[in-house]
Image (spheres, rainbow, N blue to C red):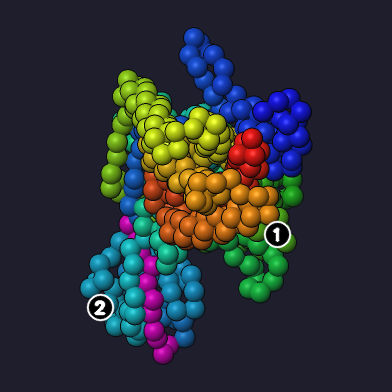
Amino acid sequence: MNKKELIALLKNWQVALLVILVIASLFLIYPHVEDEKLTTNLQYGLDLSDGTWLQMEFQAEVVGFETERPVGEFLADLQKKLDAEIYLVEEDKMEIRTFYTREQLETAFEESGGRLTSYEQGVSKETAEQVKKILEDKLNALGTKDAKVNPLTGLSGVSHYVRVELAGVSLSQAKDIVGKQGRFEIRIHTTGNATEHILYGDAINTVGVPSQNPPGSNSWGVSFTLTEEGAIQLRDGAIQYGATTNPDQHYLEMLLDGRVVYSAPLSPDLAAKLQVDPIRELYASTGTGQVALNDAKNLEIHLRAGALPVEVKVAGSGYVPAALSDYFKTMAVVAFIIAVIAVGIVVFLRYREPAIVLPMIGINLSEIVILLGIAAVIQQQLDLAAIAGLIAVLGTGIDQLVIITDEILHEGRVPSPNIYQKRLTRAVGIIMVSAATVIIAMLPLALMDLSTLRGFAIITILGVLIGVLITRPAYGKIIMAILSK
């Protein structure tokens, strides 16, 4: 192909798009030497990077129920009987934040005037996201690098596990970090910016979910209860420092690890009550509107002082040392190179024409480069399952290029332009059906947070889409220019 023909080919928008995306992907991957090692912007999973993973099981359950009693009364009786935090997640479903067997709950439900209709160990999606936020805040505050927290949620919307991945952290350190509590403190302003300590987070007994006060209004806040000792400490401190007689000059502040997370005066009603008796049940108002709701959600997390809303039990753990991760990384590269060579040999034995084989391999590799560029942008972790997905994309890609080439070279002759276009359209139609089948098969794995399997599915789906939308059309134009010679 001479220079003029090459320029004409590059002016085709499909080929030009392919070239632009390959160049852009190389910039996004950014292979460079750092500390005498080849480094990229790609994010590696624990298989290819030393660190620890913990998979923790929620000690709670989401259950369905039926009752002829008013739901509020039924929940109140059940909460007293079980001595557990209970929250309504749907009209006929509740989350119980203490672990009970199905048999234990059936008995308690009957005694409270209801019936258990479904049982699934785990927590609601909202609680799982709250656990994720608490753990991420804790890990970020500790400066832990490359920490990943992923609730594993089933199709029912109930999360049974949460998986935590920590790069460069030993197994004992990981258990200590995840289980470590933050220090929550309540202080009262005295004069100027000076404050005095009142109580710590261990005086907080229970914390509610963000709620509207009064119900149905747009005013948000979080309710919490103090221990008897904590209530006395709050009353004595509020009286001593003038918060009950002049609340606007003596704000109550809540701090997490020394950082102010809430600051407001006592309400006149609460100030008056504290003058007489200790108050155990309190409500921290955050204001009105969506911003207030977000503030209430954050305050709930802080009130828990970094403690998770439900107990978790380590169900599985693992540690990948640096030497083993380097070995896995090397073996992954070797496996990929062997796959490329094997594919090249098979294609050459089929066509025995370098002018056909080389563009096929080049297009296939460009597809992988674009896929890695997208992975760098979305920060998709590359672990052994994701590498398997890359190799699968390599195989299905060549498969589809062979379909295009065979369809075009039907009966061994190069067709006229009109017939070529018809055959190419027919080949692309076959490929589209094949791609749709792969995507449909992979979607459940991509949507169900099944850890490493999810990475495999996402890489495979992205690879198929890149092939159908970008590389296959470009290959059709390139092979047409080559065959016309």
Q: Quadrant of residue 119?
A: bottom left
Judge left or right: residue 169 versus residue 420.
Answer: left
Query: Is residue 317 among what the camera can see?
Result: yes
Judge left or right: residue 481 versus residue 52.
Answer: right
Quadrant containing the C terminus is top right
Question: Which residue: 55% across, 46% down?
Answer: 413
Question: Which residue: 48% across, 70% down?
Answer: 89
- Nearest to the eye among marks 1 and 2: give it: 1
- Which residue is label 1 attached to? 290
Badge 2, how many Cα within 10 Å: few under 14, some, many 20+? few
Q: Is residue 386 above or below residue 131?
A: above
Taking the magenta stretch, the answer to whether it contains residue 158 is no
Question: Which residue: 36% across, 57% down?
Answer: 160
The span picked out in magenta is 59-69
Residue, far left: 103
Q: Is residue 373 above or below residue 286?
A: above
- Which residue is label 2 attached to? 107
* Residue 434, position as x, y percentages in the image: 48, 57
Quadrant containing the N terminus is top right
Q: Amino acid at mark 2?
A: Thr
Label 1: which secondary element: helix
- Looking at the picture, tell me which residue is in the foreground, 1 or 248: 1
Q: Amino acid at mark 1?
A: Gln
Question: Which residue: 42% across, 88% down?
Answer: 69
Residue 1 is tagged as: none
